[in-house]
Image (cartoon, rainbow, N blue to C red):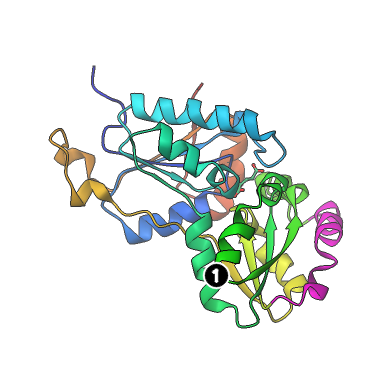
Amino acid sequence: MESLFAGFTAVLDSGVGGLTVLKDLRAKYGECDFLYLADGAYCPYGTKSASALSNRLQTLLTWFESNGVRSAVLACNTASVFIGNLRRRFDLPVYGVIEPTCRLAAQTTVNKRVALLATNLTVKSGVYDGFLAKMRIETVSFACSALVPFAENNAFNSAACDIALHNALKNLPQANADTVILGCTHFPLLQDKISAYAGNAHIVQCVTDFSPSVFETPAANDRVECRRGKTIFLTTGNAPQINKTASVFCPEANFAHVDI
Ligand code: DGL
């Protein structure tokens, strides 16, 4: 049987946040075929237990491999916490956002103090702190899972969102960090509001170190038609709901539901 997504690169997030990473990937690698998967059935990731999320990610990567996916980008910081384990278990190349984003932040910080805004699970994992410490950078973390639903449901312009932002970020100005990492791919959608708390600090959005191995080392079964610059959008959650939110900043997204 023909693999459904032969040659595609999967781009995974719990919801709409990873579309901010996908946009960048499509601009850089226009010839690649991307399968964007929003794992709505498991959203939010940042408040799950580490073992539940680790199991879920293994299920998704198994599904990618069995559908012919060529590589996977974890366009989600919380999923990227598990990249070491996933790389050990799976053959397909897996790319994340945490290490490349730390390298970017290291280029911008002068006072070597960085504020991390991320989900509860990402903050608790200490993975960012570990990479930044290796570069002699101190991390001041802010657990901000409460902000995720406002981005996911396109509810940024609400009094409830303003209150959640205040509760999460009221101490950010005192952190004395000259660089703020938006360590959750949902947060660029709230960047205007976050900027008010960041003051003059430089804001860093997530980046990945994906390189399209499909062009560099073509496999014997690569087909030319796998390189059309096509993007397919799937969600394990509610397709009409995610289409409504995505239409605001990614109008071409047209999600269909998939059960995984
Ligand atoms: N967008 C995700 C991240 O970068 C996680 C949001 C969530 O589902 O909690 O961490």
Q: Position of residue 254 (x, y in %)?
A: 47, 39
Q: Farthest residue in the top direction?
A: 1
Q: Is residue 30 above or below residue 107?
A: above
- Quick check: can you spot residue 38? yes
- Quick check: can you spot residue 257? no
Q: Position of residue 140 (x, y in %)?
A: 73, 65
Residue at 50%, 54% in the rendered image: 97
Where does label 1 land, which residue?
135
- State whether the magenta stretch is mostly helix, strand or loop: helix
Q: How many marks?
A: 1
Which region shows up in magenta?
A: 158-177
Residue at 57%, 50% in the rendered image: 77
* Some atom of ligand 1 lies within 8 Å of the CB belonging to the residue at label 1: no
Which of the 4 quarters of the picture holds residue 62?
top left
Amino acid type assigned to the residue bearing label 1 in the image: Met
Residue at 55%, 47% in the rendered image: 76
Q: Identify the image quadrant of the N terminus.
A: top left
Helix, strand or loop at mark 1: loop
Q: Position of residue 81 (x, y in %)?
A: 57, 46
Please tell me how crowded label 1 is: few (under 14), some (14-19), or many (20+) other residues with Cα within 10 Å: few
Q: Is residue 221 left or right of residue 139?
A: left
Is 166 magenta? The answer is: yes
Is 198 magenta? The answer is: no
Q: Position of residue 183 (x, y in %)?
A: 62, 57
Which of the 4 quarters of the picture holds residue 90?
top left
Which of the 4 quarters of the picture holds residue 166?
bottom right
Q: Is residue 88 left or right of residue 164?
A: left
Of the pair 171 and 8, the residue shown nearer to us: 171
Of the pair 246 and 98, the residue shown nearer to us: 98
